[in-house]
Amino acid sequence: MNRTLVIVPTFNERENVDALQRAIFDACAETDILFVDDHSPDGTGELLDELSAKEPRMNVLHRRDKQGLGRAYIAGFKWALERHYEFIFEMDADFSHDPKELPTMLNVAQSADLVLGSRYIGGIRVINWPLSRLILSRGAGLYVQIITGMPFTDPTGGYKCYRRAVLEHIDLDRIRSNGYSFQIEMTHTTWMAGFHVVDVPITFEERRSGLSKMSSAIVREALWMVWKLWFRAGLRRKPRGGPHPRSVRS
């Protein structure tokens, strides 16, 4: 077993998963993959079982129904912790996150507790998005920064690498959000605990095939979650005290 795991939630991603697992292994051979499938009606889960039977680095976690992105990642995180992985990635199944970025992010993770892939460091690195979607994403990031105080350029992004110490510290059963708000809540919880969070530039490309999971409900959840996080932190907009005892900075 490798020390690194890439978690990929899937729902109706049959067109992407074979090419994605090959691209991940081409970019970073010494890693394992966990696909978390929410009972996709298009047969994604069945295809993943066929592929994993031929590839020992590939694993599949089947869930009985569609419960959302956040719940899929929580299930994946618990699976990873039970198997003692040290570096645990989040990645979308639709090739919007380039597997070629994995080695760079993993290298940064040697001296960070959480690595965030950012679409907006030193400019905008987004391909094939309409202007309205870009404005929504940038506006959401600024909204999060202003209310929570988090100094990260892309708090809603979903390409990340956690060290296991972070996920062991967080009470995963208390994380209840799902879409954009899941990413915001996990990063905020990590940062406020005193862990070392670093953002690095990535290039984001709109999905190559299939349908986007974006919805108005996801946006509304994120709008409310930011205020909940601020109140949860006692209206503080920065971590209290020094680094967490298990941070790489300690």
Image (cartoon, grey):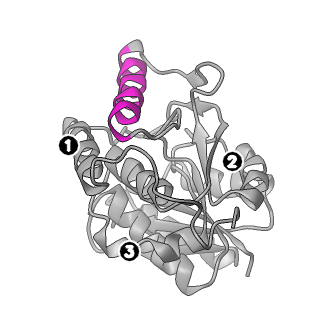
Q: Which mark is residue 224?
A: 1
3D distance between C-alphas at marks 2 and 1: 32 Å
Residue 65 relative to residue 62: left or right: left
Image quarter hosting the N terminus: bottom right
- Is residue 85 placed above or below 20 in the rendered structure? below
3D distance between C-alphas at marks 3 and 1: 21 Å
Labels 2 and 1: the sequence-earlier one? 2
Picture residue at 26% right of the left edge, 56% below the top? 232
- The answer to if 135 sits in the magenta stretch is yes
Percent of width and height locating residue 248: 70, 65
- The answer to if 2 sits in the magenta stretch is no
For label 3, the residue is 171
Residue stretch rendered in magenta on the structure:
132-148
> 15 and 200: which one is in front?
200
Is residue 5 visible from the viewing direction of this image? yes
Is residue 40 visible from the viewing direction of this image? no
The dominant secondary structure in magenta is helix
- Is residue 145 placed above or below 225 in the rendered structure? above
Asked if the residues shown at circle 2 and circle 1 are in contact, with their CB atoms under 8 angstroms apart, the answer is no
Under circle 1, the secondary element is helix
